[in-house]
Image (spheres, rainbow, N blue to C red):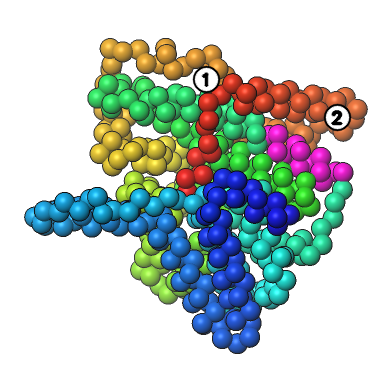
C-alpha cells in the first residue's frame, strides 16, 4: 500500500514526492521526540516544518504580490514583479500537512502513542485514496486499522457502491453544472442579467458540493475496499437551517480539525465573550486562507465567520423559533453569496457579480438558452434531489429482498456506465479541491 501510494503521487507530481517523504520523516521523528520527553521541541519541529512547507509552496507568490502592491500604494515605484518566484503548488499539500500535524499534536496531548513502525506511519500519511483532496484523516481514527484490518465481501461491496455514487456525483452532476457555472462566471459581469447571475451561482453551489463530496465518497469507498473506515466528510449541508449547522455538515474533517487544533488551542469559549469572538473570526480567517492564496478566499472565510458570530450573539435563538423554511432560505442565501467570492477570479468581479444579483437588470443576449441545455437541466434536477437524503431513505426503508437487490445493482451499474461514457468523451475536468 505504501509503495502504491508513493507511485500514485509520483505519477502526478514527479520529484515533488520528495516533499511528502520529507514531511513524513519529520513528523515520524517528531512523534518519537515528543514521546521521549522533549515535547515542546518535537511539536515545534513538526509545526514549523509543515507550516514552512505550506507557506513557501502555497503563499510565497501571494505575499510577494501583496508586498509590491502595498509599496506602490505608498508611492514607491517597483519594477521587480519579474522577481516573484513561480512556485508550483504540490497536489494535496494543504491536506497532508494538516493530517501529519494532527498526529504530532495528538502525541503531544497524550491522546495517541508515537508510532515506531515507519512503514505504518508513512502509509497513514500517503494513503492514496484520500491523499490528494481529503477527507483529512486523523491518525487516532485509523491507528488500529494500520496494524490490522478486517476484509469482507460486504465491506468491499459497500466500498464499490460508495465509489460509484461519488463518481456519478462528479461526472453526471458536477461536470454538467460546471458547463453553465464556468460559462456565466467567465462572462463580463456587465453582460449579465439578474436572472443569469442567480442561475450561475446556484449552478456553482451545486457544482462544488457534488464535486467535493463526490471525491470524498470515492475516497471513502476506496478506503473500504482496502479495509479502512474513513469518517464522513459531508452530511447534506444544503438542508442546514443556520450557518452554524452548515459548518457541522460541510467539509467536516476540516471544520473539526480547526475546532480541535486551533479554536480550542486558542482558548475556545473558555476565556470570555470577547476572546471567543476573536477566536472565531481568526479561525475563519485562517479557514479562508487555507483554501487558497487569495483575498477572495479570505473574504469568503470572514463572511462565514461574521454570520457565525451573529448567530452566537443570539440570532441562533431566533432561527430556532422562526418558520423552518425561513431559516433554511436565510442559510442558503448567505451560502450562495459566499460562493461568489469563492468562484470569482478577483474581488472587484465578486462585488460586481453580487451587485448584479440584487440590482435588477436585464440583458439583450439570451445566455440561458445556450448554457441551459437538456443535460444541464437534468443535472439541476438531480442536484436538487441528491441534496436531500432521499437515496439513504429509500435504501433504509425498502424491504431487503431479491427484487431490491437486483434493482440496486442495476441502478449502480447504470450510473457507473453513464459516468464512464462521460469520462470517455469529456475534456479534462479536475476536482475543484485539487488546487487546494
The correct choice, above or below, for 220 with respect to 74 in the image is above
Q: Earlier in the sequence, mark 1 or mark 2?
A: 1
The correct choice, above or below, for 277 with respect to 91 in the image is below
Task: Answer with left or right where residue 245 lies relative to residue 162.
Answer: left
The residue under label 2 is: 405
Q: Residue at x 71, y 27 (%)?
A: 416
Q: Secondary structure at mark 2?
A: helix
Q: Quadrant of residue 343?
A: top left
Q: Residue at x 71, y 23 (%)?
A: 417
Nearer to the camera, 279 or 135 = 135
Neighbours of disc 2 within 10 Å: few (<14), some (14-19), many (20+)? few
> Residue 376 shows which numbered tag?
1
- Give the image location of residue 223, x and y in percent: 72, 49
Q: Residue at x 42, y 57 (%)?
A: 57
CB under 8 Å between discs 1 and 2? no
Q: In this view, which residue lies farthest toward the right?
A: 402
Q: In this view, which residue lies farthest toward the bottom?
A: 37
Magenta highlight range: 153-165
Q: Residue at x 75, y 28 (%)?
A: 412
- Give the image location of residue 341, x and y in percent: 36, 41
- Give the image location of residue 169, x and y in percent: 61, 32
Amino acid at each position: 500500500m505504501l509503495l502504491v501510494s508513493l507511485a500514485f503521487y509520483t505519477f502526478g507530481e514527479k520529484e515533488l514526492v520528495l516533499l511528502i517523504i520529507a514531511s513524513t520523516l519529520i513528523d515520524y521523528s517528531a512523534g518519537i521526540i515528543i514521546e521521549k520527553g522533549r515535547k515542546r521541541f518535537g511539536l515545534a519541529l513538526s509545526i514549523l516544518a509543515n507550516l514552512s512547507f505550506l507557506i513557501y509552496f502555497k503563499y510565497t507568490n501571494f505575499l510577494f504580490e501583496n508586498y509590491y502592491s502595498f509599496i506602490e500604494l505608498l508611492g514607491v515605484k517597483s519594477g521587480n514583479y519579474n522577481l516573484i518566484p513561480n512556485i508550483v503548488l504540490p497536489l494535496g499539500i494543504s491536506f497532508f500537512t494538516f493530517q501529519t500535524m494532527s498526529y504530532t499534536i495528538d502525541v503531544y496531548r497524550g491522546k495517541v502513542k508515537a508510532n515506531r513502525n515507519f512503514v505504518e506511519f508513512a502509509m497513514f500519511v500517503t494513503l492514496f485514496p484520500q491523499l490528494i483532496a481529503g477527507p483529512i484523516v486523523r491518525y487516532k481514527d485509523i491507528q488500529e486499522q494500520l496494524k490490522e484490518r478486517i476484509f469482507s465481501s460486504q465491506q468491499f461491496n459497500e466500498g464499490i457502491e460508495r465509489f460509484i455514487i461519488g463518481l456519478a456525483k462528479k461526472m453526471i452532476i458536477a461536470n454538467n453544472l460546471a458547463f453553465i457555472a464556468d460559462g456565466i462566471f467567465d462572462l463580463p459581469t456587465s453582460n449579465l442579467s439578474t436572472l443569469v447571475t442567480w442561475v450561475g451561482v446556484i449552478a456553482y453551489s451545486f457544482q462544488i458540493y457534488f464535486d467535493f463530496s463526490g471525491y470524498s465518497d470515492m475516497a471513502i469507498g476506496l478506503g473500504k475496499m482496502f479495509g479502512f473506515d474513513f469518517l464522513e466528510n459531508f452530511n447534506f449541508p444544503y438542508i442546514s437551517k443556520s450557518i452554524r449547522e452548515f459548518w457541522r455538515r460541510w467539509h467536516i474533517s476540516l471544520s473539526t480539525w480547526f475546532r480541535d487544533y486551533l479554536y480550542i488551542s486558542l482558548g475556545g469559549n473558555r476565556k470570555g465573550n470577547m476572546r471567543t469572538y476573536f477566536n472565531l473570526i481568526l479561525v475563519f480567517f485562517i479557514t479562508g486562507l487555507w483554501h487558497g492564496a487569495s483575498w477572495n478566499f479570505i473574504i469568503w472565510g470572514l463572511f462565514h465567520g461574521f454570520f457565525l458570530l451573529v448567530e452566537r450573539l443570539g440570532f441562533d435563538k431566533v432561527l430556532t423559533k422562526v418558520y423552518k423554511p425561513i431559516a433554511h432560505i436565510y442559510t442558503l442565501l448567505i451560502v450562495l453569496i459566499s460562493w461568489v467570492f469563492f468562484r470569482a477570479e478577483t474581488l472587484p468581479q465578486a462585488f460586481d457579480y453580487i451587485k448584479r444579483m440584487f440590482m435588477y437588470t436585464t440583458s439583450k443576449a439570451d445566455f440561458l438558452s445556450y448554457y441551459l441545455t437538456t443535460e444541464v437541466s437534468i443535472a439541476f434536477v438531480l442536484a436538487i434531489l441528491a441534496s436531500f437524503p432521499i437515496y439513504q431513505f429509500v435504501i433504509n426503508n425498502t424491504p431487503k429482498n431479491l427484487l431490491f437487490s437486483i434493482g440496486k445493482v442495476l441502478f449502480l451499474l447504470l450510473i457507473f456506465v453513464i459516468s464512464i461514457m462521460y469520462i470517455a468523451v469529456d475534456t479534462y475536468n479536475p476536482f475543484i479541491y485539487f488546487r487546494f
